[in-house]
Amino acid sequence: MSKRELHDQYLFPNYAPMQIMPSHGKGARLWDTDGREYIDFAAGIAVSSLGHAHPALIDALYQQSKKYWHVSNLMTNEPAILLAKALVEATFAERVFFSNSGAEANEAALKLARRYAHDNFGPEKFEIIAFEDGFHGRTLFTVSVGGQAKYSDGFGPALEGITHLPFNDIAVLEAAISEKTCAIMVEPIQGESGVVPANVEFLKRARELCDQHNALLIFDEVQTGVMRTGELYAYIGLGVEPDILTSAKGLGGGMPIGATLSSQKIAQAFGVGVHGSTFGGNPLACAVANKVLELVNTPQMKVQVQARAMQLQGGLESLNNEFSLFAEIRGEGLLLGCVLSPEFAGRSRELLNLMMDQGVLALVAGDNVLRMAPPLVLEEQDVNEGLAAMTAAVKIFMAG
């Protein structure tokens, strides 16, 4: 029995992983246990921001591992303090709460918004507005706020006080918000539902409405953060500042970490004992994330991401001009969604598997969208080879 087959024997059946098993990686390339090489346009679902086996991240992990791995939040630790300082200095925020994942960062954001409203305006101000097809994680609270029934059905009664509205619909949002609303939660780009960007006008109006109704605006930047869109966080390019921002995925470059950012005034709602995490702010994860932020938050990286994004998007558009495979190519920076034309509806995973056979890894976002979220360190040759492999896969797909 192969090691890959052991997965199906011993792990829960909630995943359907590819048949390949990675052995090692370098930069934007992976090799499997059979020795095959792949161009990685997936980056562990937008997580491996600096690619695989980045020497600076290896060194950061090694240096911290020689000191101490864990002390809990009964003590402070230097890597967590330095990372919080770096995040505050780079964003609108004044305070940071650390957790271990995007779901936990969003859970903390939602609890913080409700607690802040409770403490400042009373217990009746607890309603949350979110959006259809949104995705915020897999905890009970976050699947309830996420607007996709496939993730929340079957887990008992939904949490009360959550309203889902059509994405990008200003009029419906204006009608729905009230003095009972404590927060609006939104992704600047809905990643899991197909890489659907929010309209700037929509986000600006959400900001205005929150100000008018003493509600908090929460930006879920778990997928769009850490230079993924060509800005350190997407809100910077949009010119709309949230009250609370969540970050994870690319922040750790592969190490599990989540961060919830807010002003000092809002953070005060999390007094001693109100919320916590045993592993949140883990020294190993924070040491690596510090190095990620140091390397990512530079003018050079911004130029790099924008250049590779233009190259990748241009190559996808050229491919589409030849094959008319996509109805739309959308997204920002190195987060792109290729929407299959109606005649190919429902076949995104089929195309994904053919691309894997040709040596390029990507993602899907539903049945109709091929998603690309490659490492930020993607090189020009990586893009060229990845597009060539993708073209070979598309030719087989079109003939099938």
Image (cartoon, grey):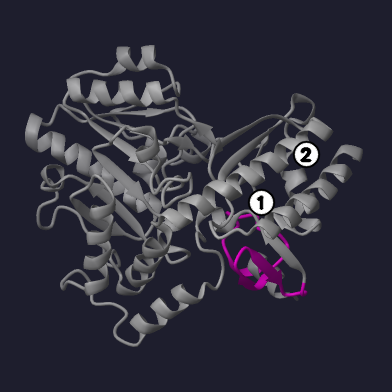
Count of numbered circles on the image: 2
Q: Range of the magenta residues?
A: 9-35
Q: Secondary structure at mark 2?
A: helix
Percent across and percent down for residue 378 are 60, 58
- Position above or below: 293 against 397: below
- Position above or below: 323 against 6: above
The front one of 189 and 111 is: 189
Which tag, 1 or 2, sits closer to the chain's start?
Answer: 2
Q: Is residue 169 left or right of residue 192?
A: left
The C terminus appears in which quarter of the rendering? top right
- Quadrant of the image occupied by residue 244: top left
Q: Which residue is mark 2?
A: 319
Q: Report the residue that reaches farthest toward the right.
A: 399
The front one of 278 and 23 is: 23
Tell me the amino acid under the disc marked 1.
Ala
- Quadrant of the image occupied by residue 36: bottom right
Q: Is residue 151 left or right of residue 32?
A: left
Q: Is residue 56 left or right of residue 183?
A: right
Q: Which residue is mark 1?
A: 362
Q: In the image, is residue 16 part of the stretch drawn in magenta? A: yes
On the question of residue 194 being in view, the answer is: no
Q: Which mark is residue 329?
A: none
Task: Identify which residue is drawn at 37% across, 44% down.
Answer: 140
Q: In the image, is residue 202 part of the stretch drawn in magenta? A: no
